[in-house]
């Protein structure tokens, strides 16, 4: 999601918005180039967008408890979850956005 859209959603969206960034520090879909996201302070960034709370999850210890805490809070939350790169050789590309939407809505 682009930063402009994220700011708009934060300003005009529901006050208990949850935004979860799965950060693998890579542009996998366009060749696997490393990003500079490790140098971004997402805590300050999220607060500047209007989020009330920031969480960073960098290991899998108690991840279910942490995610439940995020999802069931009554305020806006920006969460960064650090994940590993997958490095798929033949990364699939979406062919039907309607199909993806319907799968997500199930």
Image (cartoon, rainbow, N blue to C red):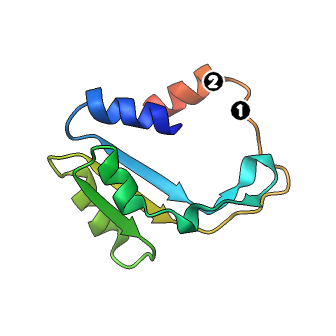
| Picture coordinates of residue 104, whole percent (x, y) | 49, 34
The residue singled out by tag 1 in the image is 94
Toward the viewer: 78 or 60?
78
- Which image quadrant: the C terminus? top left
Number of other residues with Cα within 10 Å of mark 2, as a class: few under 14, some 14 to 19, many 20 or more = few
Does the image show residue 106?
no
Toward the viewer: 9 or 49?
49
Q: Tell whether 86 sits left or right of 4.
A: right
Does the image show residue 68?
yes
- Above or below for 1 versus 73: above
Q: Tell whether 15 sits left or right of 80.
A: left
Secondary structure type for disc 2: helix
Toward the viewer: 68 or 52?
52
Secondary structure type for disc 1: loop
Residue in the image at 78% along x and 47% along y: 30
Q: Which picture quadrant has residue 69?
A: bottom left
Cβ atoms at labels 1 and 2 below 8 Å apart: yes
Q: Which picture quadrant has residue 94?
A: top right
- Above or below for 21 versus 37: above
Q: How many marks?
A: 2
| Picture coordinates of residue 93, whole percent (x, y) | 76, 37
Cα distance in 3D space between marks 1 and 2: 7 Å
| Picture coordinates of residue 49, whole percent (x, y) | 34, 44
Q: Which numbered marker is on residue 25? A: none
Residue in the image at 53% along x and 26% along y: 101
Q: Which numbered marker is on residue 97? A: 2
């Amino acid at each position: 999601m682009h930063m402009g859209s994220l700011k708009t959603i934060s300003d005009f969206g529901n006050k208990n918005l949850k935004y979860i960034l799965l950060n693998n520090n890579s542009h996998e879909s366009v060749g696997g180039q490393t990003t500079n996201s490790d140098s971004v302070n997402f805590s300050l960034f999220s607060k500047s967008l209007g989020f009330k709370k920031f969480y960073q999850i960098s290991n899998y210890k108690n991840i279910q408890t942490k995610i439940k805490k995020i999802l069931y809070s009554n305020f806006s939350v920006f969460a960064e979850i650090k994940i590993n790169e997958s490095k798929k050789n033949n990364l699939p590309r979406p062919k039907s956005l309607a199909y993806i939407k319907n799968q997500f809505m199930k």
